[in-house]
Image: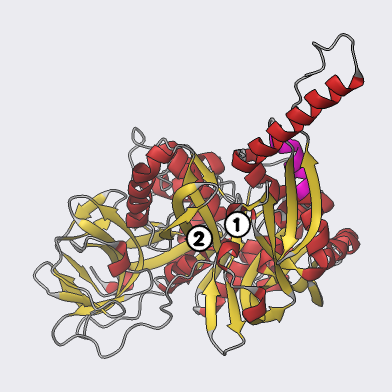
């Protein structure tokens, strides 16, 4: 195939702006999928993706199209994930392309992820084709949205196709623009092989399947290959293209997108962003931009029935085969017994993994409140990294605690600036700048601790702005803070899974709220149960769960008062003995109480 007749592009958009629906129409238009096999969101293979209407896993498809100029083109479409948690995967998919279709909803306009993805595409120097979607909706405002996009990109309004991906209006025009505007790949078949891995999944028979874009050279079935970052060597089991199912071709040339079945047994050996080259006489340098995906949010995941521990471990192993960004290690808790400390890219990633464990592996699990990774600087000069409040050393040995801070951008109508400011400042955020998109919409820039946004920040933002605001965030830096560990003691025993790290100014109020919640949630025992919140040795809040009392005086129908006193004293001694040997079971709802402390 002539390299000048190849076009590689991806579709970028905010969540729910019609990215996957447009991909469906393009597959129909190019006859890549027969009408009988066609279904909605064809490239979203997971049931969870279809339900939530968001792409979680990247996918690629090769289409053949005869353009209006009479020539036949090979078009490689890469469908990118649609959430801010997967920004790194999106950036690698963009690096595999020469162009991007920017889909903007005509009824909602430019939103957070729209701008975030535009900047990623501009960094990769891609040709951006803006497309105004959902023009068939009664609330659509294509002219206003098109003028906003013109302000952002400088593209003339007349050059933006107006389409309805649902009905197919204007989709053919989009395809013609891709062929006309997106440049052919710049590559040299004679160069040493370099291929970019932009995604991967695990196959039980073929090992890790790497989704790759060949940048230079060519790959054939008989080549011995290696990966730059991990150093893993392999001979390909199979090489082919997606159309949209995997079809073996035996080789891939410069400029093409396809898959390489590596035979490797772990996705950890074939990471997103790595470069494949020849094991002998390979390329001297890797393609730029590789990073190791780093978890930002951590939570303990425990089986509700301890007999399911082995099943949970197997399920996490299987999920990790398809998701190299998932990290886990065993941990034990006094309250919850055996479980795992799991690291996620963000809160949405955590939600997806939890749901997959429950659905696909039929597990009953309990997740503790999410926490972040802290850097603890000890007085002796040592620096330790902890991802669980239970691991925080004694406060007398700590010099400083550093927590991760994020840069956030909030896109909202002007009328909500005051409400957003109040919300962010109450969460220890620091205001930076305001940008005006147009006469009515603004971008507010803040710096805020990650620990303040991982629980309910997004929900509250939607509430105070009546659903109009959208949020984008990036990691900024670690900063020292006046942080303390608040421990919870139930019947004078510390419950490690309920411990939390928070700012000293918030500790008293958070401890008080948590104790009040636990008092209502812990079932009454035959003895009084004290529930305390403490910082070190100092108790900052206490409440008692009242004892269940048997009426021992019921049989005393008369006589001297000393008889009654004697019986009450005997009951009191019995309860004291019970309290010494009695254990209190903390219900699951108590661990979820941490998630709603700020309500």
Residue 328 falls within the magenta-colored stretch: no
Please give the residue where the numbered disc 1 appears in the rendered image.
370
Residue 521 falls within the magenta-colored stretch: yes
| Whether residue 21 is situated above or below residue 122 in the rendered picture | above
| Whether residue 140 is situated above or below residue 86 in the rendered picture | above
- Cβ–Cβ below 8 Å for labels 1 and 2? yes
Please give the residue where the numbered disc 2 appears in the rendered image.
344
Where disc 2 sits, the SS reads strand
Where disc 1 sits, the SS reads loop
Which quarter of the figure has residue 478?
A: bottom right
Residue 115 is marked as: none
Residue 35 in view of the camera:
yes
**Predominant secondary structure in magenta?**
helix
Q: Give the range drawn in magenta.
A: 515-524
The one of 548 and 83 positioned closer to us in this rendering: 548
Crowding around mark 1 (Cα neighbors within 10 Å: few <14, some 14 to 19, many 20+) is many
Position of 404 with respect to 326 (left or right) is right
């Amino acid at each position: 195939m002539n390299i000048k007749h190849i076009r590689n592009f991806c579709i970028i958009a905010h969540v729910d702006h019609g990215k996957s629906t447009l991909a469906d129409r393009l597959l129909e238009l190019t006859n890549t999928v027969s009408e009988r096999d066609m279904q909605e969101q064809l490239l979203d293979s997971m049931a969870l993706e279809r339900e939530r209407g968001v792409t979680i896993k990247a996918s690629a498809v090769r289409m053949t199209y005869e353009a209006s100029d009479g020539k036949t083109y090979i078009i490689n479409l890469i469908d990118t994930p649609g959430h801010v948690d997967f920004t790194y995967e999106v950036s690698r998919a963009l690096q595999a392309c020469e162009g991007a279709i920017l889909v903007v909803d005509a009824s909602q306009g430019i939103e957070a992820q729209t701008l975030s993805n535009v900047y990623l595409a501009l960094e990769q120097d891609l040709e951006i084709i803006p497309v105004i979607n959902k023009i068939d909706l009664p609330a659509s405002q294509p002219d206003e949205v098109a003028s906003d996009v013109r302000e952002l990109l400088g593209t003339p309004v007349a050059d933006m196709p107006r389409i309805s991906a649902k009905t197919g209006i204007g989709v053919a025009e989009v395809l013609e623009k891709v062929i006309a505007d997106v440049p052919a790949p710049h590559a040299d078949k004679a160069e040493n092989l370099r291929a970019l891995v932009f995604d991967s999944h695990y196959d039980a028979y073929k090992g890790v399947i790497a989704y790759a874009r060949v940048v230079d050279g060519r790959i054939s079935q008989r080549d011995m290959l290696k990966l730059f970052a991990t150093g893993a060597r392999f001979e390909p089991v199979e090489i082919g293209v997606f159309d949209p199912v995997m079809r073996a071709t035996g080789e891939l040339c410069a400029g093409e997108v396809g898959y390489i079945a590596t035979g490797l047994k772990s996705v950890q050996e074939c990471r997103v962003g790595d470069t494949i080259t020849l094991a002998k006489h390979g390329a001297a340098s890797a393609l730029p931009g590789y990073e190791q995906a780093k978890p930002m949010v951590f939570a303990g995941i425990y089986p509700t029935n301890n007999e399911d521990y082995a099943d949970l471990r197997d399920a996490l192993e299987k999920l990790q085969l398809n998701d190299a960004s998932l990290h886990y290690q065993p941990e034990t808790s006094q309250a919850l017994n055996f479980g795992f400390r799991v690291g996620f890219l963000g809160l949405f990633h955590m939600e997806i993994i939890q749901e997959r464990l429950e659905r696909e592996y039929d597990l009953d699990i309990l997740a503790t409140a999410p926490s972040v990774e802290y850097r603890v600087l000890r007085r002796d000069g040592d620096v330790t990294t902890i991802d669980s409040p239970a691991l925080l050393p004694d406060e007398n040995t700590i010099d400083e605690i550093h927590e991760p801070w994020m840069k956030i951008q909030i896109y909202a109508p002007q009328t909500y600036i005051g409400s957003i400011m109040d919300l962010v400042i109450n969460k220890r955020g620091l205001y930076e700048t305001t940008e005006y998109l147009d006469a009515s919409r603004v971008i507010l820039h803040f710096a805020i601790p990650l620990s303040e946004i991982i629980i309910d920040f997004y929900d509250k933002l939607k509430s105070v702005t009546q659903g109009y605001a959208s949020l984008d965030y990036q990691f900024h830096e670690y900063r020292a803070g006046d942080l303390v560990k608040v421990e919870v003691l139930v019947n004078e025993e510390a419950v490690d899974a309920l411990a939390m790290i928070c700012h000293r100014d918030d500790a008293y109020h958070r401890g008080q709220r948590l104790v009040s919640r636990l008092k209502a949630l812990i079932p009454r025992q035959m003895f009084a149960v004290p529930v305390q919140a403490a910082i070190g040795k100092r108790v900052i809040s206490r409440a008692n769960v009242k004892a269940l009392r048997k009426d021992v005086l019921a049989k005393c129908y008369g006589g001297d008062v000393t008889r009654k006193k004697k019986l009450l004293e005997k009951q009191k001694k019995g309860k004291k003995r019970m309290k010494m040997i009695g254990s209190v079971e903390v219900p699951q709802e108590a661990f979820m109480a941490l998630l709603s402390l700020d309500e």
